[in-house]
Amino acid sequence: MLRRRALGLLPAGLAAPALAQAPWPQAGPIRFVVPFAPGGTTDIIARIVTAEMSRRIGQGIVVDNRPGAGAMLGTGQVARAAPDGYTLLLSVISSMIVGKVLQGDRAGWDPDRDFAHVAMVMSTPYLILVRPDLPIRSVAELVEAAKREPDRYSYGTSGIGSMPHLVMVRFLQAAGLTMTHVPYRGSAQVVSDVIGGTLPMMIDSLTAASANIRSGALRPLAHSWPERVPSFPDIPTFAELGYPSLVVDGWSGIATPARTPRPILERLANAARESLESPELLRRYAESATAPGRVFLDDAQQYVRDELAAWTPIIRASGASMD
């Protein structure tokens, strides 16, 4: 389904502009809005990236957590911020694409028109995860059990209209199953309830679930990348199990308000590119099975346009709703 992923080749033309006469970013620290609560995996990844970028820009970057409304709250705040290079956003597929399609004009902003996309910084697949005591070890066994007892199984996600919710909706449609959705306000409590036996299964990103998979606290059944993940080679893809429509990339990027001056965007893109190549960042990414992004500036802007165009009919057809 996806034409390409945020792990494409690095485009040329990211040479740092001469900004010696420009005041940016000397006026003060840069605010980096993360539209999630502190402590989650996405928040941790954002802090890793901004720490690296801060050293390269020569100015502090302060993470400002603005959770709420499925990441739509913080995203909307940045859309309305001054385009001066002092407000950045951790852009995520769940708000930029899914949330925007589900809310439509109610969102009050457009992912292309109201944002300048600087870089894609991370990529991760989504998985179905079951608690270890559940006698289900494969997608085939899950389908068989759910068809045999259609009212028994439920699944948890980080919220209605979240990317995990949408992935599971598509899986259930493809498999011809019905399950009860149990939405939470974030993934941490879902993990706790699945491990504790309250829920049989959940859907989450590999970045978020990697530690619990390695410890055996959660059992993965399949993931949504088109090929297997090198650090988890035993986890099959949905595509190879007969679900070709379930190829999904959970990307995150850096965006600024639209009309941010091009020299600032180019300097931010350079800092992001260098940060994503740093040994320390790559080590931290590898620990959580996260892939670094390799798309910047105009290519990042086009990537978001392409994702919006590709996902809009799928989201609408899925029946997912924010209401």
Image (cartoon, grey):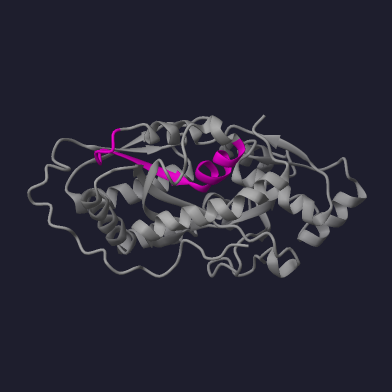
Left or right for 100, reference 268: right
The residue at 29%/33% (across/down) is 82
Q: Quadrant of residue 29?
A: top left
How far across and how far down the image is residue 145, in percent? Answer: 86, 52
Task: Between residue 136 and residue 57, name the one nearer to us.
Answer: 57
Left or right for 185, reference 197: left
Quarter of the image with the C terminus is top right
The residue at 66%/50% (across/down) is 313
Quarter of the image with the N terminus is bottom right
Q: Is residue 99 visible?
A: yes
How far across and how far down the image is residue 120, in percent? Answer: 41, 56
How far across and how far down the image is residue 199, in percent? Answer: 73, 39
Write the start and end of the magenta stretch as one range: 82-102
Q: Quadrant of residue 25?
A: top left
In reply to whether residue 196 is colored magenta, the answer given is: no
In reply to whether residue 84 is colored magenta, the answer given is: yes
